[in-house]
Image (cartoon, rainbow, N blue to C red):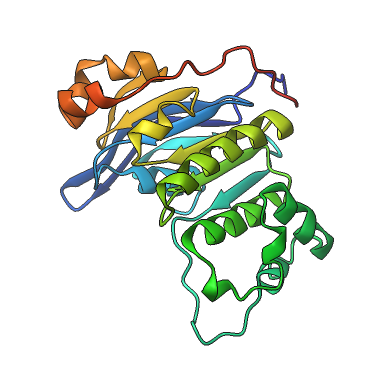
């Protein structure tokens, strides 16, 4: 395939449950090396769209096409573990039997969590756990990282650090990132493209263009939009493939 072919193509995807349209005619493409963030109100279908894209849910209509052989790493929104289970971070990562256990430490180092190798995973802070889950998603050397609320349970300082880390990973590895987020302030400074979702795609484009779109203003309100501080997202970075 040509290098410019999308890693992931979602075409006219719909999901109906009962009489309710959870997703309505979604069309979206993820290009190599770009960061795409899905934003929208609670209940807008953001996590459902990620699960559809990963093939974890069956759509009512439409299709999802992945580039042949594309490697995908997934970071879930939550991790449910038995609190009494004696599980260290290293043992948790080694449960991913598809990948060599030798990748555990290098991936932890890459996300700045190597000191957590022997820590009990149930005792990690929110930010530490998210870094460990990110390390797990990196173990397959993904070309596409799919992240569902990567800053869940992370304090404001940790959120900024995590978004900075995601940009560094993209620049270093050349992978694309598709993520869901609620934090408009940090997202708008850390993404190439924003998709505003409310069961359908209300608008999509650069952070600056989306923030001026009437559909975005309607969903989030003028006061929220006015408070957003935009930092020009670099368009001169080089994606390594």
- The one nearer the camera, 20 or 119, is 119
- Residue at 54%, 42% in the rendered image: 161
Percent x, y of residue 210: 32, 18
Percent x, y of residue 95: 69, 70
Q: Which residue lies furthest to the bottom in this view?
A: 84
User: Relative to 186, is 153 above or below?
Assistant: below
User: Relative to 82, is 17 above or below?
Assistant: above
Percent x, y of residue 72: 63, 44
- The one nearer the camera, 164 or 178, is 164
For the C terminus, give its image quadrant.
top right
Q: Residue furthest front?
A: 157
For the N terminus, give its image quadrant.
top right
- Residue at 25%, 35% in the rendered image: 198
The reply, left or right, for residue 88 in relation to residue 161 is right
Q: Quadrant of residue 219?
A: top left
- The one nearer the camera, 141 or 14, is 141
Percent x, y of residue 68: 68, 35
């Amino acid at each position: 395939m040509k290098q410019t072919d999308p890693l992931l193509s979602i075409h006219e995807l719909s999901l109906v449950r009962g009489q309710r349209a959870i997703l309505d005619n979604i069309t979206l493409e993820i290009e190599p090396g770009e960061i795409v963030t899905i934003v929208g109100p609670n209940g807008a279908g953001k996590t459902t769209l990620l699960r559809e894209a990963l093939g974890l849910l069956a759509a009512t209509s439409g299709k999802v096409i992945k580039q042949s052989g594309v490697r995908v790493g997934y970071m879930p929104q939550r991790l449910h573990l038995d609190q009494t289970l004696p599980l260290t971070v290293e043992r948790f990562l080694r449960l991913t039997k598809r990948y060599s256990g030798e990748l555990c430490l290098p991936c932890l180092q890459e996300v700045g969590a190597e000191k957590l190798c022997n820590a009990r995973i149930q005792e990690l802070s929110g930010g530490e756990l998210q870094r460990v889950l990110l390390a797990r998603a990196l173990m397959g050397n993904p070309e596409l990282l799919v992240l569902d609320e990567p800053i869940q349970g992370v304090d404001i300082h940790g959120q900024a650090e995590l978004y900075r880390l995601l940009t560094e990973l993209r620049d270093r590895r050349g992978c694309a990132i598709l993520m869901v987020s609620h934090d408009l302030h940090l997202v708008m400074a850390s993404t190439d493209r924003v998709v505003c979702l409310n069961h359908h795609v209300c608008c999509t484009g650069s952070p600056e263009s989306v923030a001026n779109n009437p559909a975005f203003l309607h969903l989030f309100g003028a006061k929220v939009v006015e408070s957003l501080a935009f930092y020009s997202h670099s368009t001169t970075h080089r994606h390594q493939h």
